[in-house]
Amino acid sequence: MGRVVIDVMPKPEILDPQGKAVVGALARLGFKEFADVRQGKRFELVVDGEVDAEVLERAAEAARTLLSNPVIEDVVAVRVADQP
Amino acid sequence: MRIGVVTFPGSLDDRDALRAVRIAGGVPVPLWHGDAELHKVDAVVLPGGFSYGDYLRCGAIARFAPVMREISRLAGPPDATNPGLPVLGICNGFQVLCESHLLPGALVRNDHRHFICRDQRLRIEATNTTWTNGYLAGEEIVVPLKNGEGGYVADDATLDRLEGEGQVVARYLEVNPNGSYRDIAGVSNATGTVVGLMPHPEHAVEDGYGPGTDGLRFFTSALQGVLSA
């Protein structure tokens, strides 16, 4: 079985309220060295067999079509999952 | 005149929208998300709620429902075969319309990170739409608002175009409840047939059941528009 990892992040110009909540919580816990946090999503897509170029392209298409909203998000990575 | 209201898994305000259609004098037609048949409705309402639990993104999964494929096809730019089905998306329905690209922009989490529930004052700005022709330009109304992810966002070019073309349907007054850019509470498509609105007009259609009846004209407007077509 192969796995494809897709990372989606909010576009840099979009306000990220969740990230703001997280950086505030970090600061309250004493992690004051982090100036900002932006929170995204990681998807793991499982396929039978190996992940080849065609599988990666289909995963990228799935990322553009459903897994991200191009108005407010960027697909920042589509890659083969690291081997365990 | 038949106005359909779609029920998705997790829709909350579908029954109130059907009720608003009935009070306005229309024939309310429940539409099931899995049914691609629109049952000869003249217009459609996408109601508020939490379709698919807001999983992935609000409206992101509902936009691919069989009923939405048919609605998207009919609500797109009008041509010889397609008159442009009127659609009103309320709250989650607005999110579905943006995810479907029937309206520009997107709705994101409220900037203050709270779910907000309040009677909200709005200014109606575009009265040439199917859903607002019963209001006066600049008229102020009060309808309930309840959302956690109601912040309307779009890039500056899109916002300038919407404002320039008169596609900003309503703006928040007194309080911006969710961080929407330029206080935008609702927008329309270029032909004024598809309108998305974050507040809930269907909760202000009968005295004693909300902050007055300011929302009723969203529904009576649609009946007028089709009757005069």
Image: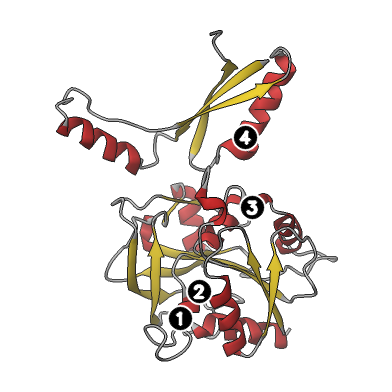
Q: Which residue is pictured at 53% across the width and 8% down the height?
A: A84
What residue do we see at 47% from left, 81% from top?
A: B215
| Label 2–label 1 contact, CB within 8 A | yes
Give the residue number, with chain letter if any, for mark 4: A64
Tell me the chain of label 1: B
Q: Is residue B151 visible?
A: yes
Q: Which residue is mark 1?
A: B137
Q: CA distance from mark 3 to mark 1?
A: 31 Å
Residue A13 drawn above or below residue A45 = below
| Left or right of B49, for residue B85 | right
- Colour basis: secondary structure
**Dot 1 crowding, Cα within 10 Å, few <14, some 14–19, many 20+:** some
Distance in Å between CA atoms under marks 4 and 1: 39 Å
Which secondary structure lies at badge 2? loop
CB contact under 8 Å: marks 4 and 1? no
Q: Which mark is residue B163?
A: none
- Indicate the position of residue B81 as horizontal and vertical percent values: 85, 65
| Mark 2 belongs to chain | B
Q: Are the residues under marks 2 and 3 on the same chain?
A: yes
Q: Quadrant of residue A60?
A: top right
Query: Can residue B58 be seen at all in this image of the molecule?
Result: no
Separation of marks 4 and 2 at Cα, in angstroms: 33 Å
Q: Secondary structure at mark 3?
A: helix
Which numbered disc, 4 or 2, marks the residue closer to the eye?
4
Residue where numbered disc 3 is placed: B63
Q: Amino acid at mark 1?
A: Ala
Q: Earlier in the sequence, mark 2 or mark 1?
A: 2
